Amino acid sequence: MQVTNTNFPDLTVIQPTIFGDARGFFYESFNGKKFKELTGINTDFVQDNMARSTFGVLRGLHYQIGDAAQAKLVSVIEGEVLDVVVDLRPESPMYGKHYKIRLSGENKTQLFVPRGFAHGYAVLSETALFYYKCDNYYAPSREGGVMYNDPAFNIDWEFDLSKAILSEKDLIHPSFAQHVPVN
């Protein structure tokens, strides 16, 4: 497992070690002991989620508020997405800035998203199977979000946003200036 720190505190890119041969491949997608040793992050994941989506589906930017905040370990089983996070931690030197990375079934890259980030992704392949682990249970009453296309973030989603497929909820998130604080 190779760990790469980003310029965002605690936001970490993880590349698992892949063992492949003529039969296919094997990799350990999560090992709590190795994860803690290599990242220095001590978290207990309590919930796993999976979503299948088609090209152009854009989910986000979502977060959980206060004691319902969630850290996530995100990956893609098949297909490809553009994964985007925005640092909403007021004390962070990267507050209000975004980070993006392509995650796919081919590259098997994972992203550890600490608590205090808004998270979203756009499907760039025909379909994608998105998988993530959470360190806290989903609490609908403690959900927050910010607009995926807020000019304050200037996110290039790497596809024509006129083709974006969004939920009604994602269409009405507030702007960054109006969002509910994560703390």
Image (cartoon, rainbow, N blue to C red):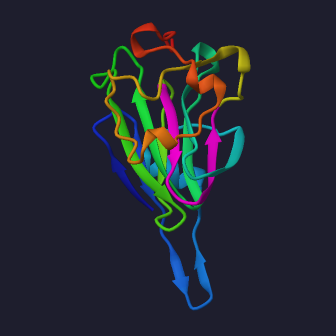
Question: Furthest-bottom residue in view?
Answer: 22
Q: Judge from the rendering whether residue 144 lies leftward or rightward of residue 101; answer left or right.
A: right
Range of magenta residues: 117-135
Residue at (55, 64) in percent of width and height: 105
Question: Could you say where residue 69 lies in the image, as x and y percent from the top left?
Answer: 59, 22
State the residue in front, 147 or 51.
Answer: 147
Residue 47 lies in magenta, yes or no? no
Q: Main secondary structure of the magenta part?
A: strand
Q: Judge from the rendering whether residue 11 lies leftward or rightward of residue 25; answer left or right.
A: left
Q: Is residue 133 above or below residue 106?
A: above
Quadrant containing the N terminus in the rendered view: bottom left
Q: Judge from the rendering whether residue 78 lies leftward or rightward of residue 40; answer left or right.
A: right
Res. 177 image quadrant: top left
Residue at (41, 15) in percent of width and height: 176
Q: Is residue 55 above or below residue 98?
A: below
Question: Could you say where residue 11 lies in the image, as x and y percent from the top left?
Answer: 40, 38
Residue at (45, 39) in percent of width and height: 161
Question: Could you say where residue 153 lies in the image, as x and y percent from the top left?
Answer: 34, 26
Question: Could you say where residue 62 lies in the image, as x and y percent from the top left?
Answer: 56, 27
Q: Is residue 24 above or below residue 64?
A: below
